[in-house]
Image: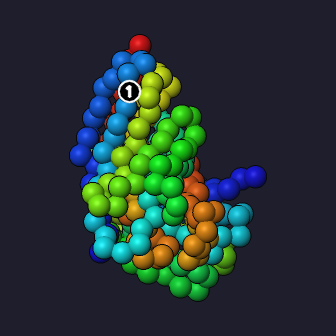
């Protein structure tokens, strides 16, 4: 079975600081990887996803993530966060071409002015 | 351009009461899912339907039942609600077994359920 670990549960940053949120998965085969964002009071929205090819994936709102197969990682990055990035971020994995996503427990990001 | 529509948005139940959460999608997706979201636990899969006519248990199915009424609709039923089922419930849909980059979940706006 596949699983996802997000080790940072709460992160507090000042505006303009750089962001990196960790995501590690466990699955031995082919994986697709996703980052979703949930703004306060809203549903989850897709930030970016990796299927194949270039391991550096660029998403919306300046976010990017790097798939490192040898480390089973898919960390989310943003060079300069904004107050509007305050949200909860979820990493998810789809293993073996199946159609279910397994989500991590989420990272609550708070950006202070 | 509705995407995934869930009803109701909020509900308070007494212990032992039953209710059905409704979900409908208009994207012609084959697969639909029910998740619950609890603080510190992320999203956990309750049931899913890979395609019309099929349903399967997810990670936390106890206390729930589902019905895939047709391709568009996938309902979640609580037969006898318990306080442990207090949660936010999300429905989602996706293409089935897509290998293309168009694969991904589309989520509904959620149902906040409180069982007292």
Instruction: Please indicate, yes or no, whether residue A34 appears anywhere in the rendered image.
Output: no
Q: Which of B115 and A42 is in front in this view?
A: A42
Q: Residue at x 46, y 64 (%)?
A: A32
Q: Residue furthest bottom?
A: B53
Q: Residue at x 43, y 19 (%)?
A: A16
Can you give x and y, in whole percent of width and height, for residue A95 in the image?
40, 71
B11 horizontally vs B8: left or right: left
Instruction: Please indicate, yes or no, whether residue B108 appears anywhere in the rendered image.
Output: yes
Q: Which colour scheme is used?
A: rainbow
Q: Nearer the viewer, residue A34 or B17?
A: A34
Can you give x and y, in whole percent of width and height, for residue B106 in the image?
58, 57
Q: Which residue is drawn at 28% across and 66% down?
A: A26
Host chain of mark 1: A
Q: Residue furthest right?
A: B1
Q: Which residue is drawn at 71% across and 64% down?
A: B27
Q: In this view, does A88 lie above or below B12?
A: above
Q: Residues within 10 Å of mark 1 (few under 14, many from 20)?
A: few
């Amino acid at each position: 079975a596949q699983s996802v670990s997000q080790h940072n549960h709460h992160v507090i940053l000042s505006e303009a600081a750089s962001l990196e949120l960790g995501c590690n998965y466990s699955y031995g085969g082919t994986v697709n990887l996703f980052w979703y964002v949930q703004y306060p009071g809203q549903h989850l929205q897709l930030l970016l996803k990796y299927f194949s090819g270039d391991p550096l994936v660029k998403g919306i709102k300046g976010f990017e993530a790097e798939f490192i197969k040898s480390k089973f990682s898919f960390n989310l990055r943003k060079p300069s966060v904004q107050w509007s990035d305050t949200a909860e971020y979820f990493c998810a994995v789809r293993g073996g071409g199946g159609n279910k996503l397994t989500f991590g427990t989420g990272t609550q990001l708070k950006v202070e002015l | 351009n509705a995407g995934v529509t869930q009803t109701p948005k909020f509900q308070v139940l007494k212990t032992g009461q039953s209710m059905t959460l409704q979900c409908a999608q208009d994207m012609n997706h084959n697969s639909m899912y029910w998740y619950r979201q609890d603080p510190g636990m992320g999203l956990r899969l309750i049931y899913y339907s890979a395609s019309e006519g099929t349903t399967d248990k997810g990670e936390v199915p106890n206390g729930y039942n589902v019905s895939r009424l047709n391709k568009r609709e996938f309902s979640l039923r609580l037969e006898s609600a318990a306080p442990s089922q207090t949660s936010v419930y999300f429905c989602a849909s996706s293409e089935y077994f897509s290998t293309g980059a168009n694969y991904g979940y589309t989520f509904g706006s959620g149902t906040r359920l409180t069982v007292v």
